[in-house]
Amino acid sequence: MPLKISYMLAMVFLADPNDIFLTDGANPAVHMMMQLLVRSENDGILCPIPQYPLHSASIDLHGGTLQQDGDCKSLHLRSNWRLPSPKAS
């Protein structure tokens, strides 16, 4: 089977219409997700560098803390993407 066809087949999946959430654009979707995810300044959202300004502005607007990937040098697949625990002093 040609690569193009197998790639297209890999992209096909079944979805329950009740599991699909539509918004009127990326900005409202990001703001809605931040409202769901951020409860206080203790909630950190990990963003890559360079990051899209909408993400950092939305995190700030909803009271969260921006965690850029420079803060997480030890973030790896082998640790299940867990952030390092703060060291006890």
Image: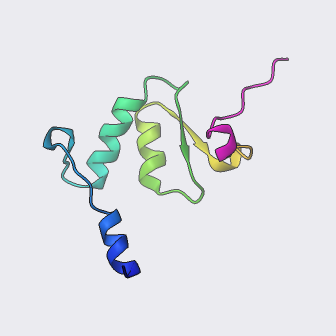
Q: Is residue 88 above or below residue 62?
A: above
Q: Residue at x 41, y 43 (%)?
A: 58
Give the overall secondary structure of the magenta segment: loop
Locate residue 2: give its quadrant: bottom left
Q: Residue at x 45, y 39 (%)?
A: 59
- State the residue in front, 70 or 85: 85
Outermost residue to the left: 17
Give the residues in magenta: 77-89
Q: Position of residue 38 (x, y in %)?
A: 43, 29
Outermost residue to the top: 89
Outermost residue to the right: 89
- State the residue in front, 73 or 11: 11
Instruction: Tell whether position 86 is magenta.
Output: yes
Instruction: Tell whether position 34 is magenta.
Output: no
Q: Position of residue 44 (x, y in %)?
A: 55, 33
Q: Residue at x 63, y 35 (%)?
A: 82
- State the residue in front, 22 or 9: 9
Q: Is residue 59 above or below residue 37?
A: below
